[in-house]
Amino acid sequence: MFAEWKKARVNIDYHVEIDRHYYSAPFMLLHREVDVRYTAMTVEIFHRGQRVASHIRSSRPGSHTTNEAHRPKSHQRYLEWTPQRLVHWASTIGPSTASLVDTILQSRTHPEQGFRSCLGILRLAKSFSPDRLEAASARAIKLQACSYQSVKSILNTGLDRQPDTESPSDRPPIQHPNIRGTDYFNS
């Protein structure tokens, strides 16, 4: 079976990315470079020539495959990042950004699986402005599109600068002679 190799860095959530799916590595390797060998069926992670992790390959983009043994006993002791810290940081941008970050963290089995997405969202305040990020976060929440990619798309297309459109129930009914209306069906 054909195997590909890739260098990767173990991220803050102790996962490496292969084809938009995240595979865990032992937490002691945070921020270290590793070699990843992957086939259609498996993903193996090597550090200094020694295999440190092996996973069944997944084709679900944006999801995580986590070996519980790779998690630290007390995750908060080893990492300065906590869900509360990320929500607090997001609240300095605005309440919608804080709500978006909180929604992302709560939607994951393990909150640290949402760290990468949340940190990406918070970094968008550097490329755009905090005001634009807050508006984009509000729109993402309204659309139930709570992800880094959705917020980035909203900002890139300028949807954060457009006024909210009214919902269909807020619009007045269309008046046209070919539309029967409710009276027609209640006879």
Image (tube, rainbow, N blue to C red):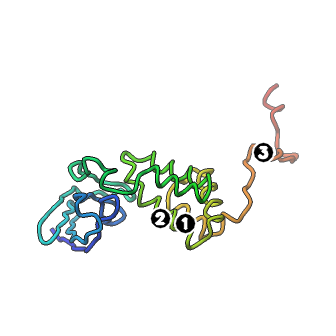
Q: In this view of the protein, which residue sits in the foreground, 121 or 57?
A: 121
Q: Is residue 75 left or right of residue 82?
A: left
The answer to which image quadrant residue 93 occupies is bottom right
Task: Name the kind of residue labelled 3 in the image.
Answer: Asp
Q: Residue at x 56, y 49 (%)?
A: 99
Q: Residue at x 17, y 68 (%)?
A: 47
Residue with the mark numbered 2:
120
Circle 2 sits in a helix, a strand or a loop, which is it?
helix
Q: Is residue 185 left or right of residue 66?
A: right
Label 2 environment density (alpha carbons within 10 Å; few <14, some 14–19, many ≥20): some
Q: Residue furthest top?
A: 187
Circle 3 sits in a helix, a strand or a loop, which is it?
helix
- Confirm or deny contact between disc 1 and disc 2 (CB under 8 A): yes
Residue 15, x across and y down, in percent: 30, 60
Q: Is residue 148 above or below residue 100?
A: below
Residue with the mark numbered 1:
152
Residue with the mark numbered 3:
170
Label 3 environment density (alpha carbons within 10 Å; few <14, some 14–19, many ≥20): few
| Quadrant of the snapshot with the N terminus | bottom left
Q: Is residue 5 left or right of residue 62?
A: left
Q: In this view of the protein, which residue sits in the foreground, 113 or 37?
A: 113
Residue 117, x across and y down, in percent: 45, 60
Residue 123, x across and y down, in percent: 51, 67
**Residue 114 image label:** none
| Quadrant of the snapshot with the C terminus | top right
Q: Residue at x 86, y 48 (%)?
A: 176
| Alpha carbon distance from label 3 to label 1 | 28 Å
